[in-house]
Amino acid sequence: MKYERVFIEAIECTLPQDIVTSDEVERRLEPLYERLKLHAGRIEHMTGVIERGLWSRGALPGDQSVVTVDKLLRTTGIARDRIGAFIHGSVCRDYQEPATACDVHRRLGLCQNAVIFDVSNACLGLLTGALQIANMIELGQIEAGIVVGTETSRSLMETTISELNGNLHHTRQSIKDAFASLTIGSGSAAIMLTSERLTRTGNRFLGAIVRANTEGSALCRSQIDVTAGGASSGQTMKTDSEQLLHTGVSLAARAFEEFQSTFDWSPETLDRLFCHQVGKAHQKLLFDSLKLDVSKNFATLPYLGNTGSVALPTAAALGIESGFVRPGDKVGLFGIGSGVNVVLGAVEWRTTLPSSEPIARETLDKFTSLLSR
């Protein structure tokens, strides 16, 4: 999948203010920890997640998506009537129907002749939406499009804690499937892609390699549990983290071989990387397997947790704003999602637009401090 006429104009993110540390999560899990004689500190030690953010209780994903897209539009200066495609790509959405994209589109006052829909592809939802927009731009159907998503993790975290404490049949082995749920964080991100006619940045989206291994489709499954009376009892997720890790990285390694030949890039010439953020074991195996320099990666996991489909674009938005990406850099957008799917995107970066609402310096410093570790 290669493009000649597609540009990534800007990537923006917004971050939640309600911070929950891994220490606090473990304090809430005290009944489980005492019963199974587990040592405090295991979440941070095993995953690298120090804290994660949560949106306000009761907030819908679309509420924050409106905020993030408005920021993106102000940053780019692209007129709202030029947005020919509008996609909502996060796992979380407001309702089963209509598409969350519809209400967000209405609240933003975007043009009525746009293609509007939701995309669902686990942690690759925003990247998948970006590819759909890129295809339309390359075909000359539209001049600009936006994909946005907002993940909210409060329900999953609280349901998981309650189930782990309340189920007295749990063993050290059985809790492993729920462990990944304790690393999930909230976030919101949006990407604008444009044609050559509209771009002010010249940041070329060269294309992407996509690969799938659907034999691993059962390795991570999330759902809304329903009681016998029909009421929701909260969101749950079961993840075979170890098997998902090896299946995903193996698939990415095969895709990376084609990525190098397609774009004539190598681990040495690839300057900057933004990857889906899962855990420190995942990062180590991925970078070792692909023979990539970890110093080229912008990590957000320790302070945001795994924010699902918005993890990669959030890392990109923060890295770009912090100056991590320089003009002329070859930038990789590497996503692995349950299913199992892989998307490896290639971007030639030229210009960074100043954000209309910059992230606080102390927040950026928190992430850039990880680069020296």
Image (spheres, grey):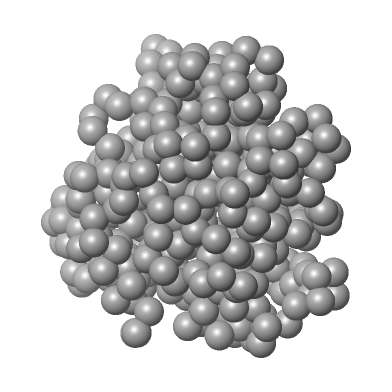
Up/down of 37 relative to 231, above or below: below
Question: Percent from the top left, x then y, of residue 44?
Answer: 29, 69
Residue 39 shows in the view: yes
- The N terminus - image quarter: bottom right
Question: Percent from the top left, x then y, of residue 226?
Answer: 43, 23
Question: Percent from the top left, x then y, of residue 347?
Answer: 66, 62
The residue that appears at 50% across and 49% down in the rendered structure is: 11
The residue that appears at 68% across and 83% down in the rendered structure is: 269
Question: Percent from the top left, x then y, of residue 225?
Answer: 44, 29
Up/down of 99 relative to 254, above or below: above
Is 311 displayed left or right of 259 in the figure?
left
Looking at the picture, tell me which residue is in the foreground, 78 or 42: 78
Looking at the picture, tell me which residue is in the foreground, 97 or 156: 97
Up/down of 371 relative to 35, above or below: below
Is 84 displayed left or right of 352 in the figure?
right
The residue that appears at 20% across and 63% down in the rendered structure is: 362
Residue 249 shows in the view: no
Res 49 quadrant in image: bottom left
- The C terminus - image quarter: bottom left
Looking at the picture, tell me which residue is in the foreground, 300 or 110: 110
Total numbered labels placed on residues in the image: 0
Is 167 displayed left or right of 313 in the figure?
left
Up/down of 364 relative to 297, above or below: above
The residue that appears at 50% across and 42% down in the rendered structure is: 76
